[in-house]
Amino acid sequence: MELVLIGSGNIATVLGKSFYERGISIKQVYSQNIIHAQQLANQIGAIAIDQLSAISPQADAYIMAVSDHAIAPIAASLKLGNQLLVHTAGSVSQDVLSQASSNYGVFWPMKMIRKGQEGMGSVQIVIDGSSNSNKSYLSNLARLIGAQVAFANNDQREKLHLMAVVCSNFTNHLYHLAADYCKKNNLDFSLLYSIISQTAAGIQGEDPATTQAGPAFRGDIATMEKHLMLLKEEPVLLDFYREFSKSIQDLNRDEGK
Amino acid sequence: MELVLIGSGNIATVLGKSFYERGISIKQVYSQNIIHAQQLANQIGAIAIDQLSAISPQADAYIMAVSDHAIAPIAASLKLGNQLLVHTAGSVSQDVLSQASSNYGVFWPMKMIRKGQEGMGSVQIVIDGSSNSNKSYLSNLARLIGAQVAFANNDQREKLHLMAVVCSNFTNHLYHLAADYCKKNNLDFSLLYSIISQTAAGIQGEDPATTQAGPAFRGDIATMEKHLMLLKEEPVLLDFYREFSKSIQDLNRDEGK
């Protein structure tokens, strides 16, 4: 099994190292910046290249881990015949790869990935492919690096990506606002760690409808009014407080609490 | 050490059992519903009562675990002299207890607690008291049941409670909306578990400013527009998407990303 990595950023780095550690050979690492390509290539026994035309035509699969907006232009410059080409993006159709190869697919790690992290850790890899044999090849590749495999077509994957934004980026933003509020008020934000973990763990295997709590859920007007007072100098949190409280109450009503 | 429990709901039940398991004697359980009092009393070797006037005047401490709005009226009916009386609420001043006793305080488990759960698990108990000796007594009590102890005065505790609402109830609501969206679109919500856990774990020991990601953070207009299109039939998620995206971008700008 011999791969080519197109890209040298967070996902390319962590995937590349994971492959390398499991004995999967990486032939080349492409980046338009040869220094970046070389940095990653050095770590995974690959050859660094900065020209798409230098990409070997004979690898088993080409993993394109680049920014979403770079996927189509790079694919337009590749001619891979029927070699397997995949991208690693949640919200980009696999069909943009069809101009580069007759075999293509998606290999999307559903995780925030940073260069410095050690290995992939526990991760779902969401897979699609232009054929069943592509999907099967990609599933094996994902399992080889210890990932759990899920399948999703373009439409399903876009929606999953959107929900990942809601469940991850939006919650992180709430943590960010809360941490800033704690800093400003000389409170130790780390006191909130355990309730944050508990909330995230609480919905695993449970419908989140059954784990909802708090003043809006209880209809505790007195506490909500106190909270709005405490936020009177905090317009952003104040707006979120109002919108969440209303939405929690509306959803309870709709679901016939 | 001998305690009296005032209340028989989620917190009274889980605290009562934790005390009992650590060999701390619970003399009485009060509830205005004698059946509820009896159910809990049976499990922790206590006597059930439904009259505040029947509360023993000689316990070491009285733990009032009742709804926020019931704390002041119950306190107004208690005459405990200088016996230690505490409530377990995040957002109620300890001073409402001063009419019932000259010794009072707060013993607030910063956790969502449900009757059925086994023990307190990992929990922060936030403590306040009308004297240093009260605070010290309550800290020992918290440590005896395996909790971590934090101190906060009324003002700090109210703000922590507000941030717990933001970090726990609001994030749970996002999970709830996402789970409903997945159900409606035949997607498996459990695929999001690992990214949810990762996000919650990612901020422990890190400033959440450094763990932010996603299209709004990157300024990826194309993906945001695609997401808004996907949400055109989902007014609640659409509003949240707009508000979060704007707020994430504003905060990045303010913090000089």
Image (cartoon, coloured by chain):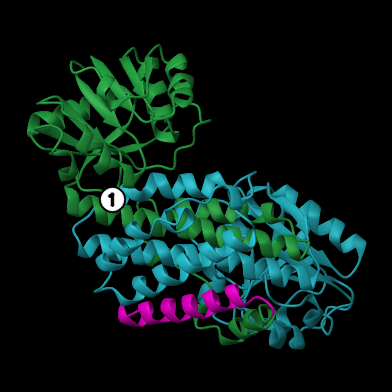
Chain colours: A cyan, B green
Which amino acid is tagged 1?
Ser
Towards the viewer: B217 or A108: B217
In the picture shown, does residue A75 fall above or below B63? below
Question: Whole-percent x and y of residue A178?
Answer: 34, 62
Question: Whole-percent x and y of residue B62?
Answer: 24, 26
In the picture shown, does residue A194 fall above or below A141? above
Circle 1 SS class: loop
Bounds of the magenta span? B233-257
The residue shown at (76%, 68%) is A156
Image quarter for residue B123?
Answer: top left
Magenta highlight on residue B114 = no
* Disc 1 packing (10 Å; few <14; some 14–19; many ≥20): many
Magenta highlight on residue B241 = yes
Question: Whole-percent x and y of residue B95?
Answer: 15, 44
Which image quarter is the N terminus of chain B in?
top left
Towards the viewer: B159 or B227: B159
Determine which residue is flagged by label 1.
B91
**Left or right: B82 with respect to A27?**
left
